[in-house]
Image (cartoon, rainbow, N blue to C red):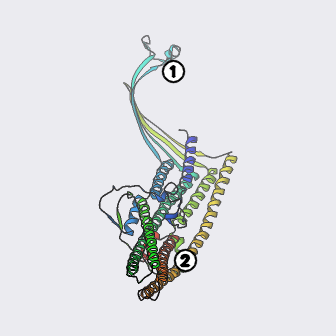
Amino acid sequence: MSRTSNSAAKLAAIAVIFAAVRVVPTLRAQVNPSSDSNYSSAANSFYGSVTVQPVTDEELKLSLDDAVRRGLDTNLGLKQAEYSEKNLRGQYNQAVQQFLPTISLVGDAGYHMYNLAALGFGPGLVQKILPILPPGTNIAGLSFITRAEVTEGQLKYEQTLFSGPVIAGYKAAGAGMRAAYFAKMSARGEVVQQVASVYLRAISAASAVENARALEEADRVAFNNAHEAHLAGTAANLDELRARVQYQTEQQARIQAENTFQKDLILLKREIGLDPGQKIVLIDRAPYSELAVQTPEEVRAIAYKNRQDYQNMQNQVQELKAVHQAYRAQRLPTLSFNGYYGVTEVTSIGSHGNFAATGELKFPIFREASLRGNIDASQAQSDSAEAQLSDLRVKIDQQVRTALLDVAANKKLVDVAQSNVELATRALSDETDRVNAGVDDTLPLVDAQASLATAQNNYVESLYQFNISKLILARSAGILEQQYRDYLGR
């Protein structure tokens, strides 16, 4: 390879480093997985996983921590981020080789035949040099076709001693590797948020099933009582019909709740690498705890320090600045050294050492159009990254403030929903006593039961939204993977 092509390879290596890392997982708004039409690995790789465990007949007891651990081990989106980092590391190693000394050892042995006449040592040349040969030299048997066994070995060394693009390339490579690392860590936070959200959704669905079963059982008892009372002639047929309708309504609600719960379990298993047919039991209940009051300024400072996507973007800015400097440095001279030492042995002649040492100082004379084009393009890309970093700082502030508002609002909604459950429970108890005492018919009782069912469902949903908002706050601060247990109050 010529020295010109070596320089081109180095610039190409810088371009490889510049273009390698561009996958930055972003913080997305949390949605209800059960109702999200895009909840599939085709639309979002974080909704898929690599199944690593075969189906067993035993029920797998699964805690939230177990689910998160399995998600980090098998989630498809995280695997792709890890593969991207490995791919970049391979490209990085290829590029860095252009910046390091190259030492190679070459050896060969062979049988050679030479046509001296074709090389210029023909009869005419012999006749010209014959007068200077010793007297009595016999050239009559001289053959112009010779044969020889040649063995040679060479140790070659190449190194660029100074080059602006090389130095800037090292900086770009380091920034690119750091960006890849933070992209992977951001993907880990995405996995924790996805898995924890689906687990909490499944817990809420399980609570809805329990509430539906309890209300169904209560309505079954009320229906039996109304039926017996009707047979005894102490209650009208209308009361029995109302009790039957309410009982069957709760049966429908229970069936729907059980179906939703089973689908949520399938989604959870899909996220953590379990076969959809594997039986699992969620051993954690819906967590509830108040969160210490934090100001937007406090959370924002934590986010600027810990947000992986923010650190990723910072390193991308450094990378683009280094690439820009690499293009600007093409105007500087380049100093390189090339050399080799070898030994060649020819049959009947012996061996002899040979070497070469060459230093090269190269100045660009007239490449202004190309240089200016590269510099202007890299400057534009660097300015674009700076603008994105500035926008991300504002976006983080916005996300932090929004998350804090959601946490505060959802906490109030939980308190209200809990109070409504208590009031609805008391109202149902009082109305049950009135019906049993013959003061009221069954219509107010049915209304009280419906109010309790609505209050319980609202409480379950508000508790779920409160926990999800705390997860989003932790993700906004960049500490979800480390502190999700503390934010959920487990």
Q: What residue type is labelled 1?
A: Leu
List x then y, in percent, for residue 258. Answer: 42, 67
Relative height, residue 214 to residue 310 (above, below): below
Packing grade of label 1 (10 A; few <14, some 14-19, many >=20) is few
Residue matched to label 2: 404
Quick check: marks 1 and 2 in contact, CB under 8 Å?
no
Alpha carbon distance from label 1 to label 2: 87 Å
User: Residue farthest to the left?
Assistant: 58
Residue at the spot 47% in from the left edge and 71% down from the top edge: 479
Q: Earlier in the sequence, mark 1 or mark 2?
A: 1
Between disc 1 and disc 2, the foreground one is 2
Figure quadrant of the C terminus:
bottom left
Q: Which is nearer the eye, 108 or 316? A: 316
Residue matched to label 1: 119
Q: Which is nearer the eye, 134 or 362? A: 362
**Left or right of residue 296, residue 107 in this image:** left
**Left or right of residue 242, residue 317 in this image:** right
List x then y, in percent, for residue 50. Answer: 41, 55
Q: Quadrant of residue 104?
A: top left
Mark carried by residue 430? none
Element type where label 2 sits in the image: helix
Q: In which quarter of the image is residue 391?
A: bottom right
